[in-house]
Image (cartoon, helix red, strand yellow):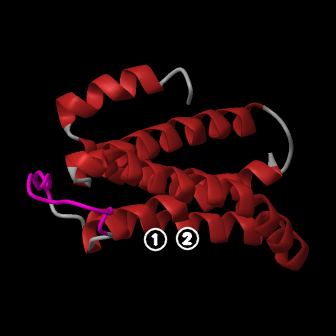
Amino acid sequence: GLASVFVIGALLDRFGLRVFLRGGFVAMGVVSAAFLLCDRVGPPLYVLRGLQGLAFAAGFNAAATLAAELAPPERLAAALGLFGVSTLATHAIAPLLGELIVRWGGFDALFVITALYAFTGAAIAWSLPVGHYRSPTAKGWVRLTRTLGATVVAVALCGAAFGSVITFV
């Protein structure tokens, strides 16, 4: 995932960030569900973990770019801070949630729930309209618009899926 960030960044400009946002979140859901097929540590687990890293890198980088695009230029830092908090919060909370889910329903429940989180994030991301959002007249605090809110929620859900599965790995 980390190595792919440089390639994904270049491809975002070429193919559009929504392709990577939607595709990354859908791929995260598919990979989370595919963990149901792993019953031991071995090559399939390593491959899925690699694909999970790629999916998260695609979705996260596209979402970060979208957050920057949606932010008023004079409030860009605040918007990216809000985006960062949503991501860090999910990484802080998700391992605990993952442990609770595993204790409640086992690893199968964890994988099903994380897949549902990722697919829900993808559905929200899918609803985002295509186009440029910059508002040259916006001033003051970052206004959490419906579109920006949907982006943050979509990323938070995908981050929760990622963080919960990290507990398993």
In the depicted structure, whether residue 13 falls above or below residue 85: above
Magenta residue span: 130-143
Q: Which residue is mark 2?
A: 116
**Tag 1 near tag 2, CB within 8 Å:** yes
Determine whether, in the image, residue 18 is placed left or right of residue 122: left
Q: Residue at x 20, y 40 (%)?
A: 16
The one nearer the camera, 129 or 104, is: 129
Dominant SS in magenta: loop
The three-letter code of the residue at mark 1 reads Thr
Q: Which residue is mark 1?
A: 120
The one nearer the camera, 2 or 73, is: 73
Residue 102 visible at all: yes
Helix, strand or loop under label 2 = helix
If the image is split into quadrants, where does the N terminus sit?
A: top right
In the depicted structure, whether residue 88 falls above or below residue 156: above
Residue 23 visible at all: no
Q: Residue at x 46, y 45 (%)?
A: 60
Residue 121 position by quadrant: bottom left
Determine whether, in the image, residue 115 is placed left or right of residue 149: right
In the depicted structure, whether residue 149 falls above or below residue 24: below
Can you name the residue that lies furthest to the front here?
140
Percent x, y of residue 10: 29, 23
In the depicted structure, whether residue 104 falls above or below residue 142: below
Q: Residue at x 48, y 24 (%)?
A: 4
120 falls in the magenta region: no
Q: Residue at x 23, y 64 (%)?
A: 128
Determine whether, in the image, residue 46 is placed left or right of residue 75: right
Percent x, y of residue 13: 21, 30
